[in-house]
Each structure stands twice: as C-alpha cells, then as structure tokens.
Amino acid sequence: MTRQADEPAPFPGATGHRIVVVGASAAGLRCAARLKRLRPRWQVIVVEQREIFSDAACGLPYALSGDIDDPDDLRRTSWGALRDTAFFEEVKGLQMLTGWRAIALDPVSHELTVESGTTVKTLRWDELVLATGARPRNLSGVAAGPLVRTFHTRRDMRELKELLIHGKLEHVAIAGAGAVGCELAEAFRSLWDVDVTLIEAAPWPLPAIVDREVGALVAAELRRQGVTVLCNSPVRSVASRDAGVQIEAGDHTVNADIIVVATGVEPAVELAAAAGVAIGRSGAIAVDQNLATSAPHVWAAGDCAEVRHAVTGDPVHLPLGSLANRQGRVLANILAGVPDRFGPAAGVIAVKIFDLTVAATGCSATMAQKCGLNPKAIWLTAEDRAHYWPETDDIHIEIVFDPASRELLGVAAAGTGDVVKRIDVATQILLQRTTVDQLARLEHAYAPPFAPALDPLGVAAFVAQDCDEGVEPLSPLAPLDGYAVLDVREPSERRIHPLAGVDVMAIPFGELRGRLAELGGNRPWSVVCERGTRSAEAVRWLKTAGLAARYLGGGMIWRVAAGLGEHSHE
Amino acid sequence: MTRQADEPAPFPGATGHRIVVVGASAAGLRCAARLKRLRPRWQVIVVEQREIFSDAACGLPYALSGDIDDPDDLRRTSWGALRDTAFFEEVKGLQMLTGWRAIALDPVSHELTVESGTTVKTLRWDELVLATGARPRNLSGVAAGPLVRTFHTRRDMRELKELLIHGKLEHVAIAGAGAVGCELAEAFRSLWDVDVTLIEAAPWPLPAIVDREVGALVAAELRRQGVTVLCNSPVRSVASRDAGVQIEAGDHTVNADIIVVATGVEPAVELAAAAGVAIGRSGAIAVDQNLATSAPHVWAAGDCAEVRHAVTGDPVHLPLGSLANRQGRVLANILAGVPDRFGPAAGVIAVKIFDLTVAATGCSATMAQKCGLNPKAIWLTAEDRAHYWPETDDIHIEIVFDPASRELLGVAAAGTGDVVKRIDVATQILLQRTTVDQLARLEHAYAPPFAPALDPLGVAAFVAQDCDEGVEPLSPLAPLDGYAVLDVREPSERRIHPLAGVDVMAIPFGELRGRLAELGGNRPWSVVCERGTRSAEAVRWLKTAGLAARYLGGGMIWRVAAGLGEHSHE
C-alpha cells in the first residue's frame, strides 16, 4: 500500500506514527510543532501549497497601513527568526512539503495525493490533520480581477501597498463592514489618506458581531475619520469604468479606483468533502470535542473546522486566529495521548477602528433572535477608571440576556477606554453558562489607575437586574418624540451634549426629589442623563410617585457618540 | 422601649422598617442608598462619627502626589456633586447622623447608643448594619504623633501635603511595603522629589500579595526610581532626633524627617465585640454569605467584616474597596428581600508602582504554603500584544498551582504591559475552583493591537502543563552556579541582557538540534533564553538526548528586571 519511493525520506529517528498535516496555517503548524515536541520520534509531515506561509494574517491590515514596516515581521518569531521551510524543518523537526497541493484524500487506504507542477505523489499516513483554513468570499456574480480584489494573503496586501506607494489609489471602495473591512478602511485612510467608501449590506457596521446600538458608534467613528459609510447597501453590480470601477450598491452609485471585497471568509473544505468527510450545516468540517471528523483517523482544526457556540450550542464557523492556534495545540495533545479537548467557544472578538475599540462575546441580540432565543438588551456608558483619575475614557456596554431565565447571552462594548479587558472578563463568565446575577457578583482588581471600585461590567449587570424592579432602559438610539422628556443633568452637561429637537423638562438630579410634583401630564416620561445611571435612579422616584417612566440607556454620551443629537462629539 | 423624642424625625413616608447603618463608608453608604431605592418607604439612618466622609480612600495617595488636584474630587459623584450630608439626605433620602459616634449596641433590645460631644441618645432599629471599616495599624511600641504618622484619612493626607508644600520634608521613611506603602513611595518621590526609604520586615515588597520573584521586580522598580528599599528590616524602634526621627530597622539605622506607618489596617470591631457579636479568627466580624453576623438582625459589610477566601476556604480579612462596595449592594438586596449572596472572593488586587503594574489573585505560593497547601510555581515573560505590533510591553506572570490535584491556586503578574486584564480574567477562572488545564483552555479576544493569538495567561498555563512532561523551570532568581548553563539566545539578545559571572555555553536556538552532541559533562544543564519559551523547548531536546536539564523560568528579561545579571534594565 505505501509507496516508499514516492515519499520523503523519514526523518532521522522517526519510528512511530506518521502524521500528515494538510495546511501550514496557524492550526496546522501549531499542531505539527507541538506534536513533534511531545513525540520526538514520530514523523510529522506538513503539506502546504504556498511557498511563503505562516503569516500572521490578522496583522496584514497593519502591514498595509504601514504600522508594521516589514511584512516579514508577520512570519517571524518574537526573537526574530523567520518561520520559513528551513525553520520548521531544522528548528522544529518537521518535514515540510511546501509547494505541494493536496488534491485527494482516501480515508480508507490512508493515502493523501499531492501535486506540485506536473508531479503527483501519494503519502501514506497514520493520522491525517486537515488544517486547510478558509478563503475570502467573493461578491456573487462579480469576478475577481485587478479592480476587484480580496484581502487575505500577503500577496493581496503587497499588491495593494504597491498601488498605494505609487499613488495609484485615490478612492477605494470596500465591500463589507466586518472586522477586516473596518480595519482596511482605517489602513487606507489613516496613513495613506485615501478616500474610502465602506459599503455594507446590513443596516450597521460589524453586523455579525454587534447590535445596532454599538454599530452606530462604529459608523459614527468611521464617519468622523472621513470614511463614507453606506449601510443597507448590498452590492448589486460592479462595472469597469474610466480605469476604475462603478459600483451599484443599494440606492447608491459609487465610483472608485478599485473595490476590495471583505465580505468574510468561507472554510476550504473541498478536499474533505470529496473524501466523504462530513461537512456541517455551517459549511465547515464537522468535528467533535476531540477535533475528530466523521472519518476515523482524520482530524480537523482551524478555520476549516466547526466550533460549538457556547451560548446557542450550535456548531458554527468561527474563523478566529485565537481559536485556530488553540485548536492546533489541543489536537497535538489529543494525537499524542495527552488528555485534552476543545470545548464550546463564546466567539469573543476585538477590533480596533481608528480611536475606537470594539469587542464582543457571545450573542448579540440580533444573533440570539435568529437562533430562536428571546433576548433583551440593556446599555450603560461608564468611565473605565476611577472617575477622579486624571485619565479616564468612556466605554459603552451592552448586555444581552434572557429575561425569563436570566441567562447571560452576550456582552458587547465599544469606546476609547479599556474595552477589551471587560469583554475578556465577560467571556469567562459567559462560558460558565450562567446568569446576569453571576455577572453582578463580578470580582475585579480595583485601583484608581485601572478601574472604578465597581467595575463597569458589573454595573452593567446591575442595570440588567434593575429591569426586574421595573427600571427599564430605552435604546440609546430610541426616538424620544413619543415621550415627555425629563433631563436630569446639570446645566453644564446639557450644554456639552444638547438634546435638540425635542421638548425637554430640565430638572437637575439633585433637585428632583423635591420637585416631583411638577411632573404631570399623560405621556410616559423618558428620563435622560449623561450615562444612564442618574436617569435610572430617577425612574424609581417617578414610579414611586405613580408616574410611568423609562430612561435613555447609555445616556446622552452614547447617543451623541452614535451621531444623534444636535452636535456631534467633535 | 423607643424614645421617639431623642430620635430624628422619621423621613416623610417612612412607615416600614427602620434600618440603622453604623459607618458612612463605601459599604455603609452603598447599602443605605440602595436600600432606600429598593424600599423608598423604609427609614434608613446612617450614623457617622466624621463630618467629612465618603472619600474614595484608595485615591488618597494620588491626592498626595498631586495627580488629583482637589481632594474633594474623591467625594464627588462622576457628575460633580459633592457627596456630603446634604447630598445623602436630599438626593438619596437617607437620614444622616453625622458627627455622632456609635458607642454601644444592644442586640437584644435593638438599641444603638450614640454620642456627639456630651449628648448621648439611643436609636431603636429593626435591622442594624455594621459598616465600621478598618483603621491603620500602628507600629508596636511606637506612639503615633507628628513624626510618626499613618495614612488613612483625608486629614492624614492633607497634613502631609501641607508639610510637602512648605518644603518641610526632605526625607520620609515609610514602614511597610504593602500596596499603600508602595503607592506612598511613588507619591512622595515622583512629584515632590523627596528622598524615600521604604522599610519592610519581610524579605520583599508586597509580601502579603506576591512571591519573591514578583516582589523582586517591585523592589527593582522602586530602586530604579530612586527609592531606598530595605527588606528583612522590621522596625525595632523610632526615636526623636534633630527635629526628625531615627529608626532602627533590622540592621539599618534610618534618619528621616518623619516616618509614615503603612503596615496595613485592622478591622474596627469594638462596637460589635462589646455587644457579643462573634469576631472571627481573622479579627474581623464573622458573617455568613448573607452578611449576617452571629446576632439576629445585626449585619456587617465592608472592611470590618470577614470574607471567605475562594482558594483556601478560610474566613479572612480582605479590606478591599471593590469588595466593600459590592457587599454594600448585596446587603441592601438581602435586607430588601431581593435574592442575593456574597460568595467567596479571590482577593484580587492591583497596584501601580511608578511604571510597573502589579496585580495578583488567589494565593501566592508563600500564602498557600502557610495555609497547608502544597503549591508549585511557574514563571513566564511574554509580550502583552502581538509581538510584531509596534507597541508591546512585557508582562511577567507567575502561576501557582497544586501539582497533585492540578488545582489553580493563584496568578500574579507585573510589568509595564497590560497586566490587570490578565489578572481580572484569571480571577474569573480561579473563582470556578478549577485546574490549570482549564486556564490553558482560555478564550480571549485576539487582535494584534490588544493581545497575541495565544494570550500570555493561557501560555503560562501551558508552561504549568509542561511540568507534567518533565519540562521544569527554575525560579527566575535561582543561582545558576550549580549548573552547566546553556544560553540559547541570539548573540544580539545576549548583548542586551548579559549573563555575567557564570560559565556559559552559547548555542543559538536555531542551531541547537544539530549541536546537541556538544553538550556533555556531568552537571545538570540550566537552559537560558530571553523569556523562558525557547529554553523550555530546548529542555525537551536535551532530555530526548538523555541529558538532565531545567530552564530559567521567565527568562533573562525577568532576571534582569529583578536586578540580577551584570547590567540593570536601564
């Protein structure tokens, strides 16, 4: 069965299992290298079609922007070694078949057919790891070409950077305001000062990650930085025009030099599918918690494999570098017989978009609804450090939960402050499949330079709990015209973030208890303050006085940061 | 029984329970204000001896340093309202008895005796909350006075600042290198340029929080900033001398203008103890998870009450503002009949010490040993963001675990990077009472500006797991002279952080697999690299080649940052 002559010579000392890994991606290389560390006498072969690989793909937007000078830094170790074929062979002890493409897999005969140019050969394996990754989606009906590009590889990045360096790009359209689309908008805009039009089919940016309220903060930040943001605008056609492209998207016509398609990635599963390995509903390779596929001795890890979502319990496609790296290690452990498993994931993600940090974990309300859950959201704006600390920044937090079971479903946050810490912390709590009440019991490291005495994340959980007592927020974006609006801010605050175009009764919080009698009328009250805390407390007093009231969740700071209100945040 | 005439008039509408809170501390006020929100018709009375209260005490070092200009900022709300008696009465609806000291408590007759000047009166209560806080410890046998001060109140801060402003302090001695002692060293030194001698009885700073390895980083940072640090130096005597003090501490004699005693706080429990309320072994008031004391209808919260430690299970005294604030809220919920409880705490804490951030959660190895556990520690130095990101900083991480049960016991970290995020995340995992293997499954938000693809905290858990495979670190501070030292760094790294005074064989990591035959000899090998990752991998190869080897945990960066090695970090 084995055709030794066709195969690379066994590595000196390789006497045990023979493992073949398809794909020198994060997952594949991590798995192969650890396996060789754990079982030095095993033979570990990596098949990779590209000659240059092991790029940290998440760094590519920053190589484009110029934040990272030398793109080779993306494939160096922290001590400066280039992670090329020689590195993985000499330093890590792997057998690298770079420039070889895997074209067929036979799970019964344990053979993998690979080709390079016109040469075809067959490798026998004891265990096979599919780490074939993902590839960028194209726009349906629009062919890729010099004017319609994707951004997934080092080559994609280099070609775009060449155009920028030579001043060939004055106006770039980007299709898709996901994480990569937003990062690209920043890359083109911040250093190269290119006009950018960001085109999104959904009603707000980052629609797969956050709800409308956080998405509005993203859109406003992009616009403040000079990016044209077109939401609700699916691309209908892209035509060549005047050495550039003309794009029809929603109600808009956009003329640009090129369009970069950043509408997400899809798992590369052809090899697996053709071999009869089960593909899940998400389109990625179905695996169990041992990362085993449906075929015995065939395993999958990284962007080609499914992950179980911690909140919905569904197998999903979560192409995240953090998960891929960890899966590589876990799979090496499993193959070496070291106890391990890859459990459900919250899908936590963070994106830097100019001066805004956005991060989310678990489900947005939008996603939860799609999955048949019954979510409720609350909002809070809070300072990220003790409010008297000289340098504090605001963070806007949304908590999504099931009001019946109290189950925590997701947390998202955005702001100029320390957002990621809160979302990383929320992830650990979310992964416990617990309630907002557990989140309210949050223990955190408090010192004025790092956090307030009650952390914003815990306070946001209090806000969720307050709903039980009838203290209910309105969305930060809610139209206020159906309400009698009560503004409990200080006069100075009202000047900074004015409430324009609505009739407002203004009573500072400190005077309100004594002036409740002034609040008559038939309309329900909407109480407004700066961050959504005073107004929530005021709602209690109004309710005690027999008045119907809600409050503006996240306060005027959120509303204004989202581009509502008379004046923008500038 | 009740003497209505002696009591404050009931608040309008107060018809239900009467709650008396002793102490307008974080816990007391938080409890009182929330209770009044939840149960607006109840009467909530706060008894407080001071006229000025509700200071954020954790901010006092920054008021002293000048980072915070106006000390009143420490008792303002985030919207600028001064939290004085009028605020709590008018805005929060509490009845404030400020300037009244609680002198006796009768849990049977439900009476509290209070005095102000020569006036004594008795309050009847339905539920009594003890929130009497803590007070600074004095040096045994040394009387407080103008030359021997503590730093606990706004008045303490103001008096010291007056002396600084008038140039009266050229040399300050601080007894106790705990969190407050270290913060004070920075406050005196950084803005006022005062000579500071920090005196600690234990062998390293922050001895109650971190082990020797992290403590050495703290000592080195303090010294780099010009602070004289005397460890192993219990204060034996303080004598007046030449308008200043002469301090005998360990083998040292220190002359200074004043000495500030920062040796910790002790719970203020006299009122409770005299009333027969049970005091725990820690010296604080014993409470259950409902914050109920041994006396029916008497409750305690904040720095006067015990907390159950999440790792040891013991009741301990953890005087932390974060816990006190949360206890206040929890107790209000419990008193109002809203389901809640105050569970075990990991005691997570963070301290800024000049440019170094230090944070820790759970047990140090030292503390675990004292509690009868059998801890093991590992160390790692890692970059806090993707290593190719233009701005990364190092963080040094120690993980403490039980090698038999694999139970995670504690995590500490220090560095110029994003330390607190990792410790806040570790806290959530630690509170689950789980293993290092669970920590290794860490899910985190990855994007190059925020974290590497594998987070340092998770990688540190890998380091702990590696011990199972015989890959064992030495302490970053370990003497290396008993070993044959193998330095696997690149020549450029060896120039930056040289290994002085030991015979070293230098073979760069990339060449090592081909040069293993050069490593003979009888002595065990100690492999050294920059951060403790390459050297750990090298240990596997040496072991495969039949050589005994360990590696320097945390690498040369840790060792040099701790002040070992020929050159300091400057």
Image: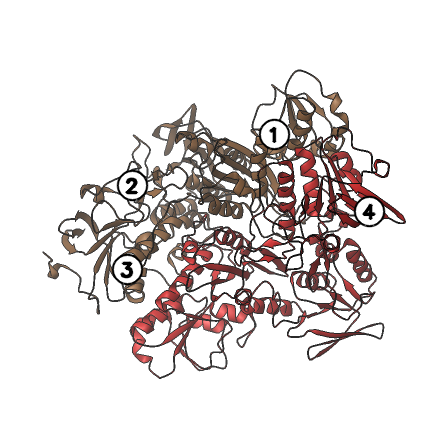
Chain colours: A brown, B red
Q: Quadrant of residue B233?
A: bottom right
Per the model, the C-alpha gap separating discs 4 and 3 is 71 Å
Circles 4, 2 touching at the beta carbon (< 8 Å) = no
Q: Chain of mark 3?
A: A
Q: Amino acid at mark 3?
A: Ala
Q: Seen in the image, is A86 located left or right of residue B256?
A: left
Task: Tell me the SS state at disc 1.
Answer: loop
Residue A505's quadrant in the figure?
A: top right
Task: Determine whether, in the image, residue A45 is placed left or right of residue B43.
Answer: left
Circle 3 residue: A336
Location of mark 1 (residue):
A471
Do discs 3 and 2 share a chain? yes
Residue at left 48%, top 67%?
A: B374
Q: Closer to the observer: label 4 or label 3? A: 4
CA–CA distance in space, label 3 to label 2: 25 Å
Residue highlighted by disc 4: B114
- Distance from the alpha carbon under mark 4 to that under mark 2: 71 Å
SS at mark 2? loop
Q: Which residue is mark 2?
A: A284
Q: Are marks 4 and 3 on the same chain?
A: no
Query: The disc labelled 1 sits on which kind of residue?
Result: Val
- Return the chain for callout 4: B
* Any part of residue A25 in sight: no
Neighbour tally class for label 1: few under 14, some 14-19, many 20 plus, Cα within 10 Å: many
Label 2 and label 1: CA atoms lie apart by 43 Å
